[in-house]
Amino acid sequence: MSINAYPVIDIKMGKVSFKLYRDGTLADFLDNEIQLYCRIHDGTGMIDIPVKILKKVLQQSVKFNLYEQTMKRLKLDIESAKTSKDEVVTYYCF
């Protein structure tokens, strides 16, 4: 079975959804759930976060002490994924 390699033509980034250093409790939660830091440091900086994990984050927003803007961005990210029928949101962390 062959594996094909395709060039990446375009990567478009949206606005910042969250900041790893500012939103430390959120980043720690994501690290426990999906090994966030390993994925960032061992790969390209692009990570997929399942929508179900992002929904958990919003349900526990008080625990994570999230900024209102962060919650708004995460809600938009979830809605965008639903519209595209994706089960994950891809983030580029740098």
Image: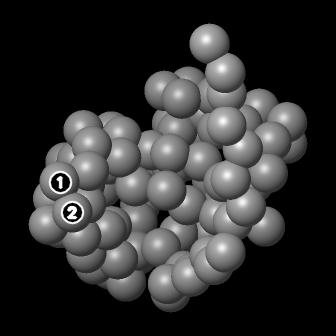
Q: Position of residue 84 (x, y in %)?
A: 21, 63
Q: Which quadrant of the view contains residue 36?
A: top right
**Which label number is shown at residue 76?**
none
Identify the residue position indicated by label 1 in the image: 85
User: Within 10 angstroms of label 1, few (less than 14), some, or many (20 or more) residues?
Assistant: few
Q: Residue furthest top?
A: 1
Tell me if label 2 and label 1 are in contact, CB under 8 Å: yes
| Vertical comparison of 33 with 86: above or below | above
Which residue is pictured at 79% across the width and 51% down the height?
44
Q: Is residue 4 left or right of residue 40?
A: left
- The residue nearer to you, when weighing 8 against 61, is 8
Please say which color scheme the image uses.
one colour
Q: Position of residue 48 (x, y in %)?
A: 50, 45
Residue flagged by tag 1: what amino acid is it? Lys
Residue 21 showing in the rendered view: no
- The residue nearer to you, when weighing 29 against 14, is 14
Which residue is pictured at 36% across the width and 46% down the height?
88
| Vertical comparison of 66 with 13: above or below | above
Q: Position of residue 49 (x, y in %)?
A: 45, 44
Identify the residue position indicated by label 2 in the image: 84
Q: Give the SS element for disc 2.
A: loop
Residue flagged by tag 2: what amino acid is it? Ser
Quadrant (top left/top right/bottom left/bottom right) for the N terminus: top right
Which residue is pictured at 57% across the width and 81% down the height?
13
